[in-house]
Each structure stands twice: as structure tokens, then as C-alpha cells.
Amino acid sequence: MGLRFFITILGIWLLFIVIRNAYRKRLAAKAEADKQRPAVDMVQCKQCGTHLPRHEALCDSDDYFCSQEHLLEYKKDISH
Ligand SMILES: [Zn+2]
């Protein structure tokens, strides 16, 4: 009876270790995925190529600009 009890405990313990490792691996993978995702959505100025957060950029249809001047410059460039 003693040996069987010991093997059962060992089995439960091993199962616990395996589940814990799998859980930790999942947590680590999730943390890594969070790290890779940029905190803010970055856009690029169509005129000078500067990267800036979307909420700070000026938006004209699908184009983004770092400033009003660049928006106007870009419009001027494509109009002629
Ligand atoms: Zn610009």
C-alpha cells in the first residue's frame, strides 16, 4: 500500500510540475507579445517622413502629417 501511495503522490506532483511549467511558458509568451506591440499607434508624416503618435498627427483623408505646414506643402506638391 505504501509504494502505491508514494507513486500516486509522485504522479500528482509530476503533473503539477508539468502544468505549472506550461502555465509559466504561456505567461512568458504573453508578456513577450505585449512587449512587441508598440504602446502607441505611430504614423509617418507624408511630407518629411517623421514618425509621430497618431493622436498628435494631422490627418487628411488617409495621409498623416507632423504639422499644418507639411500638410499644405504636400498638397501644393501634388497639385502641380
Ligand atoms: Zn513633416
Image: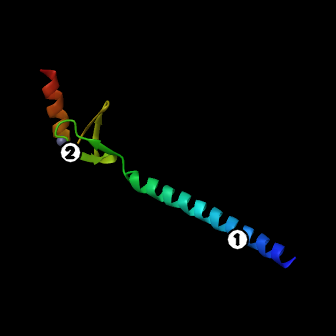
Quadrant assignment for ligand 1: top left
Q: Is residue 19 left or right of residue 39?
A: right
Instruction: State if disc 1 and disc 2 touch (CB < 8 Å).
Output: no
Outermost residue on the bottom side: it is 2
Q: Which residue is mark 2?
A: 50
- Mark 2: few/some/many CA within 10 Å (<14, 14-19, 20+): few
- Mark 1: few/some/many CA within 10 Å (<14, 14-19, 20+): few
Q: Is residue 52 left or right of residue 27?
A: left
Outermost residue on the top side: it is 80
**Who's the residue at 14% across and 27% down the image?**
76
Q: Nearer the viewer, mark 2 or mark 1?
A: 1
- Under tag 1, what secondary structure? helix
* Residue 71 to residue 30: above or below: above
Q: In x, y percent, where is residue 54?
A: 33, 44
Cα–Cα span, label 2 and label 1: 56 Å
Q: Which residue is mark 1?
A: 13
Q: Is residue 76 left or right of residue 21?
A: left
**Closest to the observer: 75 or 42?**
42
Give the residue type that dot 1 points to: Trp
**Who's the residue at 88% across and 76% down the image?**
1
Q: In x, y percent, where is residue 5?
A: 82, 74
**Who's the residue at 63% across and 63% down the image?**
18
Q: In x, y percent, where is residue 62?
A: 32, 31
**Who's the residue at 41% across and 56% down the image?**
35
**Closest to the observer: 31 or 11?**
11
Q: Is residue 52 left or right of residue 75?
A: right
* Residue 68 to residue 13: above or below: above
Q: In x, y percent, where is residue 80?
A: 11, 20
Location of residue 70 (image quadrant): top left
